[in-house]
Amino acid sequence: MHMADALLSPAVGGTFWLVTGGVFTYSSKRVQHEIDSRKIPLMGVIGAFIFAAQMINFTIPGTGSSGHIGGGMILAILLGPYAGFLTLASILTIQSLFFADGGLLALGGNIFNLGFFPCFIAYPLVYKRITNKRTSPKSITAASILSVILALQFGALFVVLQTVFSGVTELPFKSFILVMQPIHLIIGLIEGLVTAAVVNFIFKAEPEILQVADPLQQNDSKRSFGKVILLFACIALFAGGGLSWFASQNPDGLEWSIAKITGKKELPPPEQGIHSSLAKLQEKTTLWPNYHFNEPGIYDNAQTPKASPLSALKTGTLLSGIIGAGLTLLSIIGIVLLLRMSKPITS
Amino acid sequence: MAKIHHAFFDVSYFETLAGQNTPVHLVDPRAKVLTTLLFILMVVSFDKYAISGLLPFFVFPAVMITIGDLPLSYLLKKLFLVAPFAFFIGIFNPFLDKQTVLQFGAFAITGGWISFTSILLRFTLTVGAALILIATTGFREICLALEKFKIPRIFVLQLLFLYRYIFILIEEASRLVRARRLRTFNGRGMTIHVASSLIGHLLLRTINRARRIHLAMLCRGFDGEIRLMRDLKIQKGDYLFAGGWLLAFLIMRFIDIPALFGDLVMGLYP
């Protein structure tokens, strides 16, 4: 469920870079101040462990397919929220660079979706609440499963929100979310079971690891977690506000798709309608730039409400578009050939 | 499992590629990171129906691959491996956006197909740019560049540590998996229970390793502060590289080059 650059608009990608950057800077400060020096190698090696653990595939009961862990919640449990968040961010950075999972613009959003929710929502509000009262295999199991499911539900929701706000795809919010949430409920259940089993394994073998994980956070957790949550709520509100502002500023985002939906119903006279102004904007950037919205003949014939004003098109501009695209690609190939030829001389 | 194992063979292969000595490899990592980010930003800022506007941008990967001596077929293979997400989200566009935009006789092209094509082009460009960045720069250099960009030190360290131990732990995990597989038929019986205990063992070993590493670091005078060797020097050529590409991106972003070409040709042969 890594978001991809190709589906993001710069406004949405940028907003999540900012939000993630804020959480990230705060976490770095906390880790830098509170860290006992053991945690520096521990964070690095446990990050590598998550990669390695993903090699261990297990069969998913009842399906015959196999899966591997994602690991966000394990990181939060073993390292505490701040170090866990940073470690997950480092894992996603490496994935985006080497495996092209997600992308660089989407990295902010991906760190937010996969890191923020397990570390700062599910861990303090669910996992800690349950296990602080009584730490036993049963409470660990319940806490792990619940928190993983919660974190993944939030993550999936934000993937949907980012996709829809970006407006690159046509997926409607409702049907997208109806697909994503149940799928991630199942994934969350399985991931939760594995997380619970691993944490229980550690609890049986070396329980002190789980206590060592965040001795420092425990002291001040009551007071400062409240503050932190408040801070993040503010960031989220600010981001939400910023996001919608960006979206409405941006003609190719939400407004454009809304305009298109209403345009389909009403088919306003193109000379004054929102279409014509958008069309002018679009003319600069689209494939066949000079298309005509209102060839009188076609408009008169199109009595059916579904007929599209876009369908009218001069063959001449189409041809010029195709020729132009072909020439552009040819010239790129030309540049490459030139570089190839000149290479033995320069190097 | 084979997949992940293969993926890590890739990581070392990228290091080999990054170790080359071409003019692109010699550019300061900061210039390359910045240029790549700008490139991605420009590409995704296009309107969702953009196709022709995106085409000139292929010049950046093309030039980088040629000068940087990168294996094109290998990079394309990597692209296809990660394509499914963008593909399956994008493939709904043709079914949802059925407004006809173009008409070739009886053959109609809808807005959905155009935006789907646009998504695939964006995907190729953005993912390609990230792969090219790592293949011409190398991970350590990127981390040094991040440190110069004032990314918190602790995170840069985390990246370097993580990268260093990935290979070792992958080796360890594949030994575990191999040992278990040798003792079963067709690798059956890898239930969640079994896998969890394997993961648990791996985790215990990992934590013990971290302890040993920490002790070794203390023995060598570690005081909680890690000093990175800074050997980055920015030169005139690096400014030229970043500035030149930025100019090119801006021109390609705001002037529709294919349209100009098309008009030119149509003007010659009316």
Image (tube, coloured by chain):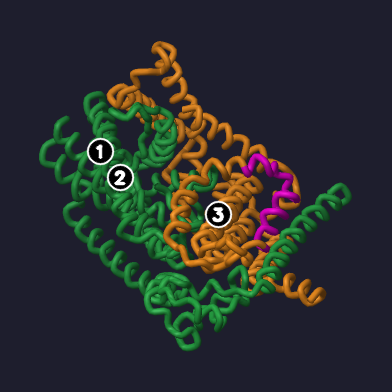
Chain colours: A green, B orange
Say if labels 1 and 2 share a chain.
yes
Name the residue rendered at 77%, 54% in the picture. Answer: A336
Residue B251 can be seen, yes or no: no
* Mark identifier at residue A189: 1
- Residue at the spot of label 3: B120
Image coordinates for residue B209, horizontal then vertical, percent: 41, 28
Can you say whether A332 is above or below B213 in the image?
A: below
Look at the picture and state if B9 lies above or below A321: above
Q: Residue furthest left?
A: A133
Q: Which mark is residue A184?
A: 2
Please provide the residue range marked out in magenta.
Answer: B56-76
Q: How far across and down, in percent of the image, does residue A118 sit?
A: 29, 47
Query: Mark 3 belongs to which amino acid?
Result: Leu
Question: Gap in Å between the C-alphas at discs 1 and 3?
Answer: 33 Å
Is residue B73 found inside the magenta-colored segment of the image?
yes
Q: Counting other residues with Cα less than 10 Å from the Cα at mark 1, is it few (<14), some (14-19), or many (20 or more)?
A: some
Above-or-below relation of A171 to A244: above
How far apart in space, not on screen, are marks 2 and 3 (Cα)?
25 Å
Under mark 1, the amino acid is Leu
Q: Earlier in the sequence, mark 1 or mark 2?
A: 2
